[in-house]
Structure formats: structure tokens, C-alpha cells
Image (cartoon, helix red, strand yellow):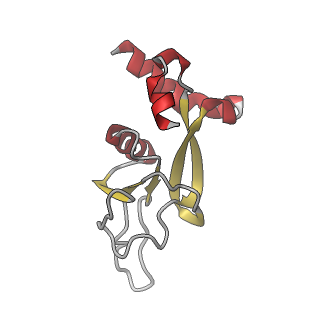
Amino acid sequence: MFALIASLPLAAQPRTCWEMKPGYNAISRLVAAPGKERRPDIFFFGETGSADACRGACEAEGPGCAAFAWMGPGKRGVFGGADKWARGCYGRGASTRTMVPDKERVSGVKVPCDQLADGDTAAGQQQQQQQQQQ
């Protein structure tokens, strides 16, 4: 089936958008420690300043990155220690079904644009407009 989609003209391929999931963690319990990765399932892109920058890192990885998780700005621990996961940006491979509620995190998953409500397609449309201008 992938070969069929890949062989379609670019205009016939479904547009891809991002379904944003604030308050969800796409990598919860899948990474043993901050900064670790398990390619091709989990990617570590380093620290980024925002969920949008993290989404951009996942997009730059190409079709192998189907979802991302930005760990947020971080919070101080009970004893004042820094959050070691703060600003970490991670990507997920093809398996993106697991999203764990986590108010400190922001995740996003690639979906066909026609699966989103009209107001939710902005992220995908913006990306495609940029690609068409290049």
C-alpha cells in the first residue's frame, strides 16, 4: 500500500496536518531517561524553545517521524531541583497510538487534513504552503 501512495502524483496524495494534543505525552514511559532515543521508534531532537519548534524538528526528520512530544518549559521539583526533561523534543516513529495525559507536555500527531475540524488544519496548511513556495 505504501508503494501505491508513493507512486501517486504529489497532488493526489492526501494533505498531512498536525493534530495538536496539549496536555498529552506521546513518549510517556517509552524513554528510560532524558535525552535518550531508540531509533527508529523514538527520536531525541535536543532541546527546543517551543512545541512549534519541536514540530518542525519532527517534520525535518521526514515521513519516519509521525508524532512529537515537547516536554514544556519545565518545573521545579519539590526540593528546588530542575526538571531534567525540560524543553526536550522527541519524535515517534510509525506507532503513535499511545498518548498519555500529562499537563506539562504538548504532543502532536500527523493525520490526513480531512480528518480534522476546519479550525484545526492551520498547522498542516501552513507547512504545505511553505513547501509549495520553495
Locate residue 37, reporting x and y percent. Answer: 31, 64
Locate residue 11, reporting x and y percent. Answer: 51, 15
- Furthest residue toward right: 117
Q: Is residue 23 above or below residue 131?
A: below
Choose top left, top right, bottom left or bottom right for residue 44: bottom left
Between residue 74 and residue 43, name the one nearer to us: 43
Q: Residue at x 44, y 28 (%)?
A: 6
Between residue 21 and residue 41, name the one nearer to us: 41
- Furthest residue toward bottom: 79
| Residue 88 visible in rendering | no
Locate residue 54, reporting x and y percent. Answer: 39, 47
Name the quarter where the C terminus is drawn. top left
Q: Is residue 74 above or below residue 89?
A: below
Q: Is residue 52 above or below residue 96?
A: above
| Residue 30 visible in rendering | yes
How many discs mark residues in the rendered view? 0
Q: Residue at x 35, y 49 (%)?
A: 49
Q: Residue at x 59, y 66 (%)?
A: 100
Choose top left, top right, bottom left or bottom right for residue 38: bottom left
Q: In this rendering, would 58 be left or right of 22?
A: left
Choose top left, top right, bottom left or bottom right for residue 102: bottom right
Between residue 42 and residue 49, name the one nearer to us: 42
Q: In this rendering, would 61 be left or right of 24?
A: left
Locate residue 112, reporting x and y percent. Answer: 60, 34
Q: Is residue 16 above or below residue 104?
A: above
